[in-house]
Image: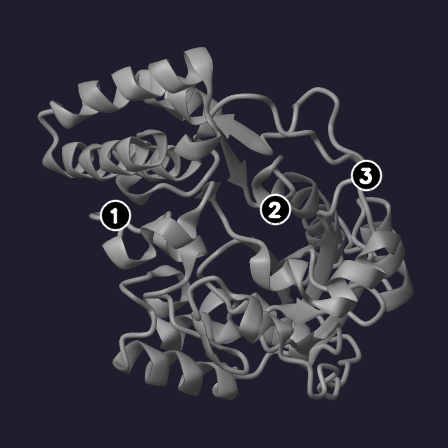
């Protein structure tokens, strides 16, 4: 039988994470995340989750590390920046924006780093399981408890000296490491994120009403709420507004940028007319790594139709004519939801081009 390796020290864990671009790391105790559990239950009861699953699906499970790893003693949490060194220019035509975190797959290298840490701990005879973008644990609460950052008023974790453009992941383990301490609030009297949200979705510091949040509405199935269609603007997937107005994120985030993967061009912009012409299979190949309710491309098409109505005023010539033809085609679509959104956008287009 193979003799276990020595348990890696915390300094070795940090160094191993750094090899994979994990710039900030900490440890939280593997106790029930009571504050997060209470908040999830209260907000779910109030309907603020707007049907969102993820950690809301089973708050008692997603706030109990023991459910993930029996006998857990520590939760290692890591943050990897996703602000890129390059900012792709907006192409011509009917273009829609994509949230920064979704330009490329930033979770893959994060998982690589967490996997390397997990393997080292397992080789020492301890149990360890990694979680990244997973509903098994509330990683932002863990990051706060570990001292990686404080909860901003936009409900994102703000890393001191770096801001909020980070993806988070955890390793729940039976190994014991020294825990950090939560940081004090660093936002002070600033409320730019509350005032800068295009739909007023941040209803109190750290409290987001998902029923108004564009980042959730573009993922949610069904009809896009009429009252928020104009506010959607040219956003197809994700919304960065509450981060783009955050002083620490805008000013200090410049220090933490990552190069884009040359083998995978960033999807910062999407031509919505091309999207509306594509088949289901083509859309899944292009955008399948994004979350999509029921993996049904109709929701991308729904978003694209709303965006088309919002960018119509900027279209000229062949782009404008193609938009008209596309909307007329979708107004006759047998899918009632797509037909209704196309009709809304066609009327928008007619009003701005009359």
Q: Dot 2, how many residues are within 10 Å of its Cα: few (below 14), some (14-19), or many (20+)?
A: many
Q: Is residue 231 left or right of residue 331?
A: right
Which numbered dot is residue 28? none
- Distance CA(mark 2)–CA(mark 1): 21 Å
- Quadrant, the C terminus: top left
Q: Is residue 291 left or right of residue 53?
A: right
Sequence order check, earlier mark of 3 and 1 = 3
From the image, tell me which residue sits under label 3.
85
Closer-to-camera residue (271/126): 271
Q: Residue 230 in the image: x percent, y percent? A: 37, 50
From the image, tell me which residue sits under label 1.
221
Residue 71 lies, with reference to residue 35, above or below; the image says above
- Distance CA(mark 3)–CA(mark 2): 13 Å
From the image, tell me which residue sits under label 2.
101
Q: Residue 219 in the image: x percent, y percent? A: 36, 48
Sequence order check, earlier mark of 2 and 1 = 2
């Amino acid at each position: 039988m193979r003799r276990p390796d020595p348990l890696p020290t915390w300094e070795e864990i940090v160094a191993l994470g750094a090899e994979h671009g994990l710039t900030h790391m900490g440890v939280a105790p593997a106790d029930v995340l009571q504050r997060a559990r209470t908040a999830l239950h209260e907000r779910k009861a109030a309907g603020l989750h707007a049907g969102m699953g993820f950690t809301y699906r089973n708050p008692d499970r997603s706030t109990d590390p023991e459910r993930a790893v029996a006998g857990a003693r520590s939760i290692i949490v890591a943050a990897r920046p996703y602000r890129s060194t390059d900012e792709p220019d907006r192409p011509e035509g009917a273009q829609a924006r994509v949230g920064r975190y979704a330009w490329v797959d930033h979770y893959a290298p994060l998982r690589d780093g967490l996997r390397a840490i997990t393997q080292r701990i397992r080789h020492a005879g301890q149990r360890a399981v990694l979680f990244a973008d997973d509903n098994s644990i509330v990683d932002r609460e863990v990051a706060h408890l570990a001292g990686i950052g404080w909860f901003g008023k936009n409900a994102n974790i703000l890393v001191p000296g770096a801001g909020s453009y980070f993806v988070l992941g955890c390793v729940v383990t039976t190994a014991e490491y020294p825990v950090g301490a939560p940081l004090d609030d660093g936002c002070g009297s600033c409320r730019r994120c509350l005032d800068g949200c295009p739909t007023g979705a941040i209803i109190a510091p750290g409290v987001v009403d998902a029923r108004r949040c564009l980042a959730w509405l573009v993922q949610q199935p069904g009809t896009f709420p009429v009252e928020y269609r104009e506010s959607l603007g040219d956003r197809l997937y994700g919304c960065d507004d509450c981060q783009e107005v955050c002083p620490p994120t805008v000013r200090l985030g410049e220090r933490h940028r990552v190069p884009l993967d040359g083998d995978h061009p960033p999807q910062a912009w999407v031509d919505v007319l091309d999207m509306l012409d594509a088949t289901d299979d083509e859309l899944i190949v292009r955008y399948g790594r994004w979350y999509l309710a029921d993996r049904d491309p109709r929701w991308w098409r729904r978003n694209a139709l709303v965006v088309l109505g919002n960018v119509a005023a900027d279209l000229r010539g062949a782009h404008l004519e193609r938009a008209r033809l596309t909307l007329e085609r979708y107004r006759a679509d047998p899918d009632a939801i797509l037909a209704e959104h196309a009709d809304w956008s066609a009327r928008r287009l007619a009003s701005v081009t009359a």
